Each structure stands twice: as structure tokens, then as C-alpha cells.
């Protein structure tokens, strides 16, 4: 597994896919790109009138560069600094238990994705960011998140415009810059956290039992400790995740992933982030020519960083101080890491803890993924205990 000529050789160096596009799959190559200021995020397109989703894209740190990015990011970091991960985990857990308690009786089936995966994390954030109606805010944020990246259809964009305007009004009298930062925190957490919850539970429901044998479900409560500090970054950069294609109904064969044992929620999330991160690709554009891994990248060329492939690299670069190595590159690295990995893990943990306490997962259930920038299961069925 760790010999110099072993599995690492299966991960090719930075390679051109033609038409000015490159793909980076090795951990070291991806970190080199993400740490180089010559590589910037793709622009979001033209802005729009205040209160529209196009205005939001043009106003957030996520799509900005240089000093503009640093200034906007500082506001986001200050807001996140007020949100204690332990308190968020407890809040998400309590809210998820409440939602489960109100949706049926023992033996009833529930769709975890529809009921909890987006609604609970965003509502928990909304309550702490000053919104009076957190569940209404979660619905608004979900609509905006569907159009956060450019290219959505006109009907969705129209709804997102209306919900962006609602969020701006709901966050008054905060300054417009602070309002943008708060909306960005919720929007960027929405799909990525939902994807992490759904993928982790899907993997848990079909993990092999200790010593082999059939997959097992679990109804055990998970550990209730605080999540490990995250590796760092973006919960929002991603790639199309299958467009409704059926996913594998179990963990990858032969690599020992989740094989047996009682997996605490924190360990489950760390392994999910390393192997099947919700945002599996990060994109950059070369603002100037650069040499990476022996390849010459021309100004204007695009680089796709394959985060999921890098999770299989047996020779990763030592992680940045203060970031969890087990999460790999799922939260990014370099100049633009996700500002709130601890909060994201806390929200996901709280929901998963509640599901494990109150539900029995159903092994062998195929899962399809939304056709979106982030890998989010369309549904995930469980039975109430």
C-alpha cells in the first residue's frame, strides 16, 4: 500500500484534457494549485439589482479575488467565530429530534434528505444569525443555494431572486455587507452539509459487518462529543454529481473502508470526507502562466482539482497546522480554505446523531444523486424507532 511504486502510480500527474483544461488528481499537485495566487476562482458573471441572486453572487467572498475576497472573507470569519461548534451540534441534534418526533410513529418511513438534511443545519445557523423564523429561512436558503452557481434555469433563478430579497429583509437592520456574509454562510453550508449527511448515512447503512457478512443497519446513538476540527475549507465548490445516476449500494470493495466496528459519527464523517466528499471538484483559472508538476499552464487555462481522487492518494502532503488530516482536501487548502469546517462538521454530526438514535437505516437501498454542483442524495429512507 505504501511502496514508492505502489498505488500512488495509479494517480497520474497533472494532465491536459484538451481545450485549455487540466485535471489535477494528486494531493501535492492540488495543494500547489490552491496555494498559488495566480490561480483564481472562475468569475460569477454579471451582477444584478440588490436583493437578487446574481447580486448575491457578485457580492460574496466565494467568487471574489484579491483584496475584495480578503475583506469579504474577514466578515464571514468574524460571524463564524461567534458560532460555537459544540452549541451548533447540540442545536442541530435537538432540532432533528423534534422534526423526527413530529413526522410519524415507530415503524413509519421517513426521507431523511427531505425532512432533515438541508432544513436542520440551515435552521440551526439561521437561529444564531438573527433570523426570527429559522425554518422559513431554511426554505429560502435552499432555493437560493440551488442557483448559487451560475447557469441555473430561469424559473429557479426567479424563485431564488424572491427568496434572496426575503432573506435581505429578514436580516435587517444589519448592514448590507454583514447581511451578505450571513446569507453566504447559510447558502454555502446548505447543499454541502446535506450532501455530507446523506452520503455518510448511505455508507453507514451499507457498511459490512465486522468479520464480513451482510451489510448491517444501525439504530445506535452516536458519540456526543464535539467534532474534530476540520481540515479547512470550501463547502461550496463542486461538480455535477451524477445527474440522477444510481450510485453504488455499498462501500468500495477491497479497501477496508468502514469494514466492521462501531463507527462513531466523527470518524464516519472524516472517512466520508476523505473518500466521497460532497464537493468532489474545485475549479481554478490561471490568471497568469504557471508551472505546476512539470507542466506549463497558460494564462486563461482552467484547472479542475479532483478532490475525490486525491483522497485515494497514499502519499498525501502533510496537512496545514490546525487542520484535520483525516478530512484530506474536502475543505480545500491553500489560499481559500473553507472558513467554517468545525461548524459544518458540528451541524452534520448533530443530525446524524439524531438519525442514529431514532431511526433504523435500510441496507441495500439504491441512492441516486441530484444533478447539481454538490453530491447530494435525492432521498434516503429510514424507519422510525
Image: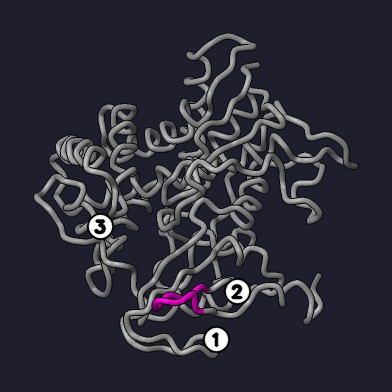
Q: Position of residue 201 (x, y in %)?
A: 62, 37
Q: Earlier in the sequence, mark 2 or mark 1?
A: 2
Q: Position of residue 149 (x, y in %)?
A: 31, 53
Which image quarter: residue 310?
bottom right
**Residue in front for this viewpoint, 9 or 138:** 9
- Residue 60, disc: 3
* Magenta stretch in the rendered image: 16-23
Residue 129 visible, this angle: yes
| Number of marks | 3
Q: CA distance from mark 3 to mark 1?
A: 32 Å
For mark 2, what is the residue?
26
Marks 2 and 1 in Cβ contact (< 8 Å): yes
Q: Residue at x 55, y 20 (%)?
A: 110
Q: Residue at x 45, y 52 (%)?
A: 240
Q: Quadrant of the N terminus?
A: bottom right
**Residue in front for this viewpoint, 244 or 253:** 244
Q: CA distance from mark 2 to mark 1?
A: 10 Å
Q: Secondary structure at mark 3?
A: loop
The crowding category of the residue bearing disc 2, from other C-alpha atoms within 10 Å (few below 14, some 14 to 19, many at least 20), is many
Q: Earlier in the sequence, mark 3 or mark 1?
A: 3
Q: Residue at x 62, y 17 (%)?
A: 384
For mark 1, what is the residue?
293
Amino acid at each position: 500500500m505504501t511502496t514508492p511504486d505502489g498505488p500512488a502510480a495509479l494517480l497520474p500527474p497533472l494532465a491536459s484534457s484538451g481545450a485549455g483544461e487540466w485535471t489535477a488528481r494528486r494531493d501535492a499537485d492540488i495543494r500547489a494549485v490552491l496555494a498559488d495566487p495566480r490561480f483564481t476562482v472562475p468569475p460569477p458573471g454579471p451582477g444584478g439589482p440588490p436583493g437578487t441572486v446574481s447580486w448575491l453572487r457578485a457580492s460574496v467572498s466565494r467568487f471574489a479575488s484579491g483584496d475584495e475576497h480578503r475583506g469579504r472573507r474577514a466578515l464571514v470569519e468574524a460571524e463564524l467565530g461567534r458560532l460555537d461548534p459544540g452549541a451548533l451540534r447540540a442545536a442541530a441534534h435537538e432540532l432533528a429530534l423534534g422534526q423526527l418526533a413530529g413526522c410519524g410513529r415507530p415503524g413509519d418511513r421517513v426521507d431523511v434528505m427531505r425532512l432533515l438534511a438541508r432544513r436542520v443545519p440551515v435552521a440551526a445557523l439561521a437561529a444564531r444569525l438573527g433570523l426570527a423564523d429559522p425554518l422559513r429561512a431554511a426554505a429560502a436558503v435552499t432555493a437560493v443555494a440551488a442557483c448559487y452557481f451560475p447557469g441555473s434555469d430561469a424559473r429557479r433563478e426567479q424563485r431564488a431572486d424572491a427568496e434572496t430579497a426575503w432573506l435581505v429583509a429578514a436580516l435587517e437592520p444589519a448592514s448590507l455587507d454583514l447581511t451578505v456574509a450571513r446569507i453566504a454562510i447559510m447558502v454555502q453550508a446548505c447543499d454541502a452539509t446535506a450532501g455530507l449527511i446523506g452520503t455518510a448515512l448511505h455508507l453507514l447503512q451499507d457498511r459490512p459487518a465486522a468479520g464480513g457478512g451482510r451489510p448491517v443497519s444501525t439504530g445506535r446513538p452516536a458519540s456526543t462529543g464535539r467534532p474534530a476540527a476540520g481540515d479547512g475549507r470550501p463547502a461550496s465548490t463542486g461538480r455535477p454529481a451524477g445527474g440522477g445516476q444510481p450510485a453504488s449500494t455499498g462501500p468500495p470493495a477491497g479497501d477496508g473502508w468502514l469494514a466492521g466496528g462501531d463507527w462513531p459519527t466523527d470518524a464516519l464523517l472524516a472517512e466520508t470526507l476523505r473518500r466521497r466528499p460532497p464537493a468532489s471538484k474545485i475549479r481554478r483559472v490561471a490568471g497568469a502562466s504557471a508551472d505546476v508538476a512539470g507542466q506549463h499552464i497558460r494564462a486563461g487555462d482552467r484547472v479542475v482539482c479532483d478532490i475525490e481522487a486525491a483522497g485515494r492518494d497514499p502519499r498525501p502532503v502533510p496537512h496545514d497546522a490546525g487542520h484535520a488530516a483525516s478530512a484530506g482536501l474536502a475543505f480545500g487548502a491553500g489560499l481559500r480554505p473553507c472558513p467554517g469546517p468545525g461548524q459544518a462538521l458540528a451541524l452534520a454530526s448533530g443530525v446524524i446523531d439524531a438519525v442514529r438514535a431514532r431511526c433504523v437505516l435500510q441496507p441495500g437501498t439504491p441512492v441516486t444523486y441530484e444533478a447539481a454542483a454538490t453530491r447530494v442524495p435525492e432521498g434516503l429512507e429510514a424507519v422510525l424507532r
